[in-house]
Image: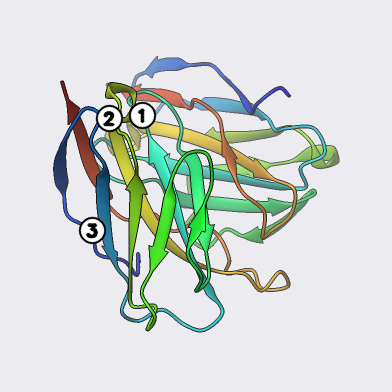
Amino acid sequence: DAKTTQPTSMDCAEGRAANLPCNHSTISGNEYVYWYRQIHSQGPQYIIHGLKNNETNEMASLIITEDRKSSTLILPHATLRDTAVYYCIVRPLNVNNAGNMLTFGGGTRLMVKP
Amino acid sequence: EAGVAQSPRYKIIEKRQSVAFWCNPISGHATLYWYQQILGQGPKLLIQFQNNGVVDDSQLPKDRFSAERLKGVDSTLKIQPAKLEDSAVYLCASSLGRAGEAFFGQGTRLTVV
């Protein structure tokens, strides 16, 4: 079962920042926070991941609270092409452990509007 | 870099028939996953391979589903016999190792009538 809680849906105006929250209150010390998104009729696409420090790449920023019980994915300037389902996933990274697959929940359906 | 290739893109079969899906992962990726995504839900892992060995198949309905990854490259997922509830998108993903970023194919949409 997924160990994260996300809002079912969110709207965002084009050009504005989209802030997608995720709760993972039972996260363990060896678990990373991953974000994927899935555009309609496509497979999921990796966005970003982090352990405890904030992370930024060309797609997004990831803010993780100090207690690691929640995080926020930030798309700084949302475009219509960012309309998708966004999945927040906690994943252990013990490379010798078979239980490190990606376990998806229901995700947040982000609608970017003109 | 070529992505994960899957075929066919769409398949319609009658219940109790058999069907097979094919996946060609990104070159050099040792880990391969098959996921099932029912409409409106997130993907659910069916099976994970490391090279040609099975790492996790705990959620694979083994009475009707089977998967293999011969030579540690391409993989096939088979359903025999299909049920109406097997209607879903079947996604294949691959990564360099068990901890690596997973890259997904576009999926095969199966409709069982």
Identify the residue under disc 3. A6
- Do the numbered discs 3 and 2 sit on residues whose CB atoms are within 8 Å? no
Q: CA distance from mark 1 to mark 3?
A: 17 Å
Q: In this image, B2 relative to A51: left or right? A: right
> Measured from the top left, where is residue B104 in percent x and y?
55, 35
> Measured from the top left, where is residue A63 in percent x and y?
39, 63
Identify the secondary structure beneath mark 3.
loop
Is residue B56 positioned above or below B65 on the image? below
Rendered-image quadrant of the C terminus of chain B: top left
* Chain of the residue under the numbered disc 1 shown in the image: A
Of marks 1 and 2, the one in the foreground: 2
**Residue at the image point whose x is 54% and y is 46% from the top:** A57
Along the viewing direction, whichever of A66 and A70 lies nearer the viewer = A66
**Residue at the image point whose x is 49% and y is 35% from the top:** B91
Identify the secondary structure beneath mark 1.
loop
Near mark 3 (Cα within 10 A), the count class, few <14, some 14-19 or many ≥20, is some
- Do the numbered discs 1 and 2 sit on residues whose CB atoms are within 8 Å? yes
Tags 1 and 3 both on a single chain: yes
Q: Amino acid at mark 1?
A: Ile
Q: Amino acid at mark 2?
A: Thr
**Residue at the image point whose x is 25% and y is 59% from the top:** A21
Q: Amino acid at mark 3?
A: Gln
**Residue at the image point whose x is 28% and y is 38% from the top:** B85
Q: CA distance from mark 3 to mark 2?
A: 16 Å
Q: How is the image coloured?
A: rainbow
Tags 1 and 2 both on a single chain: yes
